[in-house]
Image: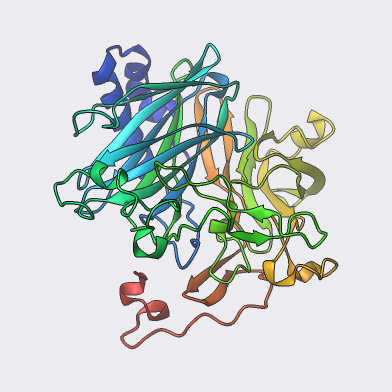
Amino acid sequence: MAVAYKNDTESALTNLKNFKGGLVMRKWLLSLFLCLALALSAKMSWATTEIALDNQAGGAAITYWTCKNGFETLVNVQNVQAVAVAAHVVIFDQDSREIMDFTVPLSPYDNWGASITCEDGLIRVNPVASFYQGPNNGSEPRHAPTSAVEGYITVAVTAVDGCVIANGDPRDEVANPACNYNAQGGMPNNGRLPNALILRSAMVNYQEGNAFALNSVALVNFVNQANNFRCLNDDNAGNPTVQNKPADDVNGVNIGICEILDSTNNNFTIGSANGQYWARYGENEIVDTSFVMIFPAMGGNNKATLNIYDDNELHQSAYINASEVENLSLMGPFDTEGQVAAFASGEIRLAFAPKYDRANNLTNDNDRANELPPALFGFSLVEGPNFVDIYPIVRECFVGCRGNNCAYFGINCPGNRPAAPAPAAGGNEGGCPGGICP
C-alpha cells in the first residue's frame, strides 16, 4: 500500500523539508505522522495470554525504529483510557541490547510523541511538551551512546492512577512498589496489564521527501511474568535456557521472549505459527525492495528459505540467515541483479526453520512437530525516486486463546490445536461480548 507518493503529498513534504522551528515543528511533524499512521492497516498479534485484534489497544506493544539512509523516526504512544497511566518505553538496538529506557506519564486520552535521531555516535529522543510538570514528566530530551542505526521499541503499562491516590498523576503509583506492574513490585491484577496503549511509528526522510508509517504489534491482555520465568529450550539439548529477558527494572515492565508465548506455551503469539509468511516486492532499474524483519528477543541465526514468485508465477529460491533485526535487500539473497530483473514484481514466501523446543517437550528434540520457528513481525519496503510503499509481512497461520483454550486461524496450520471455541449465545465470537475479550 502506498503511504507517501510525491504527487499525492508534494506540498506537505515540501513544507516538511523546509519547515523550521523547535517545538512547533515537532508538533507539526507528529500531526503528519498521525495522519500517515491512521491511513495504514496494522499487523497485530494474538497476545501473550489471550487475544489481539487489528487496530486494537493493548497493555504492551512493539514497533520498529531506524535512522538509516537519512531517515528519522517519529514515535507516538496513545492512552485510550479515561484514567491516567504510566508507560514504560525501552529502545533496543538490532541485537536486542537496551540503549535507553524511561517512563512517561499519560493523562486520560493523552498521547506522547518524540523524534528519534542518530548523530555523532548518539541516539537522541526529543519529545513534545508534556501535560505534566515537574520531574519525570515525559518531555525531557534524552540521549545515549550507540552505534546502532535501527532496532525496535517496546512500550508497556507500568502503573495506573488510583492505586495510591486518584489525583490524575500516575507517577505516584510508579514510585510505589505495590502499585507498579514490574515483577519487583506488587504486580497488581496478577500482572495483567490494562489494554490502554496504542503505539505507532513513522519514518521520515526530509532530504528525499519520503515517509512511511505503521501501527505496532499490540499485545492485548498481556501478562507480565517474573524475571526468572523459563519457558523454552533454545540449545536442542534439553536445557531450558530461554527465560524472560530483559529483566523488569524498578521503573516498569520489559517484554521478554517468554511473555510473547500463548497461555499454554505452545506457540508464539507474534508471527506465524507455522513459520511461513508472504511479502510483496517490486524490483527494476530504479525501484528496490528491502524486507525489514524484527525477531524481538529471539537472537540471530533465524534460518529461512525465500521463494520468489513473479506475477506470472515464475519461481526462484534462496536461503537466508536473519539477524535479530534484519534489513534485507531483495538483491542480497540472489546471485546477480539480472536474476531478479525478470521478476519485476510479485510475492516472496518466507519459510523459517524450527529454532526452539516447546517447554512441554524438552527431551524429544528430534520431533520437528514439537519445535517452534522464531517469531517475527515486519514489512517489505519498496522504494523509488519519489515514493515509498510499505507492505505488511503476512502470516499464514496464527494462534489465539481464551484462557487456556487456544485455536489456530489461517492456512497451513500445524493442526494439533482444538477447534476455535463456538460463538456464545447472541453470536458473540469465542464467548467474548462483541467479539472482544476483556
Q: Nearer the viewer, residue 181 or 45?
A: 181
Q: Residue at x 81, y 58 (%)?
A: 236
Q: Residue at x 58, y 35 (%)?
A: 382
Q: Residue at x 57, y 62 (%)?
A: 261
The furthest residue to the bottom: 425
Give the number of marks. 0
Q: Quadrant of residue 319?
A: top right
Q: Nearer the viewer, residue 224 or 21?
A: 224
* Residue 39 visible (yes or no): no
On the image, the x and y values in percent for residue 342 come to 76, 37
Q: Quadrant of the C terminus?
A: bottom left
* Residue 21 visible (yes or no): yes
On the image, the x and y values in percent for residue 87 come to 35, 44
On the image, the x and y values in percent for residue 243 come to 62, 54
Say if 359 sits above or below 94 in the image: below
Say if 438 sits above or below 2 in the image: below
Relative placement, left or right, of 37 versus 154 is left
On the image, the x and y values in percent for residue 411 come to 63, 69
Q: Nearer the viewer, residue 62 or 378?
A: 62
Q: Quadrant of residue 235?
A: bottom right
Colour scheme: rainbow
Say if 378 sits above or below 257 in the image: above
Q: Residue at x 38, y 15 (%)?
A: 17
Relative placement, left or right, of 263 versus 316 is left
